[in-house]
Amino acid sequence: MKIVSACLLGVKCNFEGNHSLNSALMADFVKGDLFPVCPEVLGGLSVPRSPSEIVAGDGLDVIEGKAKVVNSAGVDVTNNFLKGAYETLRIAQAIGAKEAFFAEKSPSCGSNLIFDGTFSNRLIQGNGVTTALLKKNGIKVISKKSTQKKSSPIV
Ligand code: SF4
């Protein structure tokens, strides 16, 4: 059993109430091999919501208290992101997941690229908050992208 970003399975849980369907994952889901999670919703954030970015660091820095997550309205949402990350880890451990299929570019689920914290659409290398926590606890995170022709940015 693996965990998977819920938006990759077509759940409309991203910041603008949209999904990032990866149709190749549906067969695994139907077989019962995937457990969907949305860390930002688990952290208490609404759908839709203001987009958020990690400021002055990446997900590991947030976990270590060296960086924060702020939304586009300037509200500090670090605690929501931490709660979502720890809830996701709890679920992964409860179901014995050793791997996660996570959506790229998200400040929660990103595993190669995240936005740079300036809300200017610039990407940097780094992990999202949930990705960093899962990796720290020995869970492999595999990056997946939407297979839709036109997909929304994932946040
Ligand atoms: S990428 Fe964003 S919308 Fe998708 S599951 Fe992760 S936190 Fe939720």
Image (spheres, grey):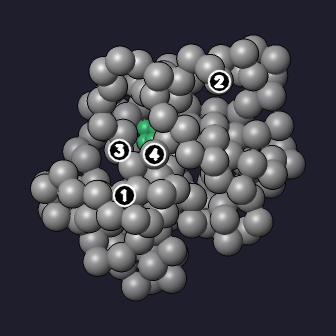
**Mark 2: secondary structure:** helix
Q: Is mark 3 within 8 Å of ligand 1?
A: yes
Q: Is residue 35 above or below residue 93?
A: above
Asked if disc 4 is less than 8 Å from ligand 1, the answer is no
**Could you say where residue 2 lies in the image, as x and y percent from the top left?**
76, 40
- Whether pointer 4 and pointer 3 mark residues with C-beta atoms closer than 8 Å, the reply is no
Residue at 61% in and 66% down: 133
Of tags 2 and 3, which is closer to the observer?
2
Mark 3 packing: few (<14 Cα in 10 Å), some, or many (20+)?
many
Can residue 11 be seen from the camera position used here? Answer: no
Image-quadrant location for residue 24: top right
Amino acid type of disc 3?
Val
First in sequence: mark 2 or mark 4? 2
Kindly report which numbered mark, 4 or 3, lies closer to the viewer in this rendering.
4
| Left or right, 118 with reference to 24 | left
Distance from disc 4 to disc 3, alpha carbons, whole Å, reads 9 Å
Quadrant hosting residue 46: top left
Q: Which residue is mark 4?
A: 104
The disc placed on residue 114 is 1
Q: CA distance from mark 3 to mark 1?
A: 9 Å
Residue in view at x 30 percent, y 21 percent: 150
Q: Earlier in the sequence, mark 2 or mark 3?
A: 2
At label 1, which amino acid type do we have? Answer: Ile
Count neighbours of disc 1 (C-alpha within 10 A) and say few if under 14, some if 14 to 19, many if 20 or more.
many
Q: Quadrant of residue 61?
A: bottom left
Q: Amino acid at mark 2?
A: Leu
Q: Is residue 118 left or right of residue 60?
A: left
Identify the mark at residue 155; answer none if there is no mark: 3
* Nearer the observer, 98 or 77: 98
